[in-house]
Image: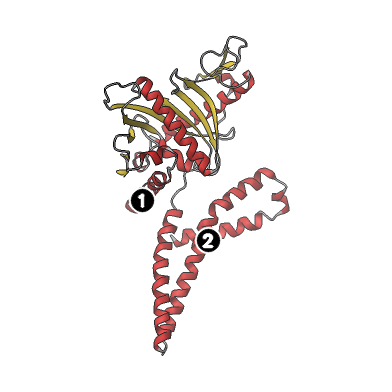
């Protein structure tokens, strides 16, 4: 581990010199790449440097205790030694986590797709609740939340809604939301007070840049048609809706909510690129069963990951056995407790796999 950490520190110092090199500063692409690499290693280097200070502090305290000290000085040295040893253990655990292989998508923006699944109107209403939950969470994180396409039902729910969430570390926090979300409650349309179970699905796709996936224009069929239904900006007036079909994969994206054909095409292309990129990643990941087992929320999207029980004001995440008796708080967007628990669980699983591997 320490050889790795020393290599990271050496590279960090090298990056500092490169970023002050005039030839690098004038090369915008290279400067951005190196700046990103430096930012990604900064915390690891800071923790490692503090670790070295603590180790030196322990050696100094032990040397001091070997001398003939008065009682007060000896007590102070013992107390300092105890504190430093505790900090050393904490830093060692932190360094192990910092050295875990990083998900290359963690700092990406995402495209999130929420759909009402089993349960008809009630499922669509629940999809709307999830939409509002993620919108509130995004706002609390200082992220941008943009609706790209929405298929709204007559009673106000969502058959489907696609949003772009942009900001710092979006994918790293929301990647675990992939899967089927189940709600148990008495629907507003239920006259006899019976609890119904419905589901909505959430798909989280990392935004794919042009440099990461090159979609050939000749592989994409473009259909232009008139927008129709809820959300269409120019219903029956202009042919502004766009449907893109990526023929090698069969992935289809339709977009009609934007104001112009050009805007619809741009948004559809963003979604198409993300879906194709995700498909390629999913296929690659399936070749590594061990990695897949250690990942949560990135596998089977039909998996039921969480239950929202209204009568008991309870949320349960089935993957990690976490239950929170504050459903109202969670649905208002206070997701930190769940997100943090999932991240810690994932890191713990990866550490175990690495140690056993």
Dot 2, how many residues are within 10 Å of its Cα: few (below 14), some (14-19), or many (20+)? Answer: few
Residue picked out by circle 1: 348
Image spot of residue 75 (x, y percent): 39, 82
Q: Secondary structure at mark 1?
A: helix
Quadrant containing the N terminus is: bottom left
Picture quadrant where residue 190 is located: top left
Dot 1, how many residues are within 10 Å of its Cα: few (below 14), some (14-19), or many (20+)? Answer: some
Rendered residue at 47%/47% (across/down): 102
Rendered residue at 36%/51% (across/down): 348
Q: Is residue 290 above or below residue 160?
A: below
Q: Is residue 28 above or below residue 98?
A: above
Picture quadrant where residue 193 is located: top left
Residue picked out by circle 2: 46
Which of the two discs, 1 and 2, labels the residue nearer the N terminus? 2
Image spot of residue 82 (x, y percent): 38, 73
Q: Mark yes or no: residue 184 visible.
A: yes
- The image's colour scheme reads secondary structure
Q: Where residue 289 is drawn, which disc sits there? A: none
Residues at marks 1 and 2, CA–CA distance in whole angstroms: 22 Å
Residue toward you, 279 or 134: 134
Asked whether the beta carbons under mark 1 and mark 2 sit within 8 Å of each other, the answer is no
Asked whether, in this view, residue 230 is left or right of residue 285, the answer is right
Residue toward you, 171 or 99: 171
Rendered residue at 59%/48% (across/down): 36
Q: Secondary structure at mark 2?
A: helix
Q: Mark yes or no: residue 6 visible.
A: no
């Amino acid at each position: 581990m320490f050889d790795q950490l020393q290599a990271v520190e050496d590279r960090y110092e090298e990056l500092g010199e490169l970023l002050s090199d005039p030839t690098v500063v004038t090369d915008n692409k290279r400067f951005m790449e190196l700046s990103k690499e430096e930012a990604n290693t900064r915390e690891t280097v800071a923790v490692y440097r503090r670790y070295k200070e603590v180790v030196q502090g322990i050696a100094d305290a032990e040397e001091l205790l070997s001398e003939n000290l008065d009682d007060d000085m000896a007590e102070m040295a013992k107390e300092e030694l105890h504190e430093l040893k505790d900090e050393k253990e904490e830093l060692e655990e932190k360094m192990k986590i910092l050295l875990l292989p990083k998900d290359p998508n963690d700092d990406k923006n995402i495209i999130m797709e929420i759909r009402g699944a089993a349960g008809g109107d009630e499922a669509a209403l629940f999809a709307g609740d999830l939409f509002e939950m993620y919108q509130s969470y995004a706002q609390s994180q200082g992220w941008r939340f943009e609706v790209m396409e929405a298929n709204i039902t007559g009673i106000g729910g969502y058959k489907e809604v696609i949003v772009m969430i942009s900001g710092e570390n979006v994918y790293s926090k929301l990647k675990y939301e992939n899967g089927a979300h189940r709600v148990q409650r008495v629907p507003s349309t239920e006259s006899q007070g019976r609890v119904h179970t419905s589901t909505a699905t959430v798909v989280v796709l990392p935004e794919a840049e042009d440099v990461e996936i090159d979609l050939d224009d000749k592989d994409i069929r473009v259909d232009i048609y008139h927008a129709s239904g809820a959300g269409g900006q120019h219903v029956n007036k202009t042919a502004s809706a766009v449907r893109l079909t990526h023929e090698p994969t069969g992935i289809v994206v339709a977009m009609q909510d934007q104001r112009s054909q050009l805007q619809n095409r741009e948004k559809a292309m963003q979604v198409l690129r993300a879906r194709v990129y995700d498909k390629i990643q999913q296929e690659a990941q399936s070749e590594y069963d061990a990695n897949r087992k250690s990942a949560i929320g990135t596998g089977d999207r039909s998996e039921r990951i969480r239950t929202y029980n209204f009568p008991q004001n309870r949320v349960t995440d089935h993957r990690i056995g976490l239950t929170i008796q504050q459903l109202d708080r969670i649905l208002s967007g206070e997701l930190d407790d769940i997100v943090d628990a999932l991240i810690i669980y994932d890191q713990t699983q990866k550490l175990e796999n690495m140690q056993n591997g």
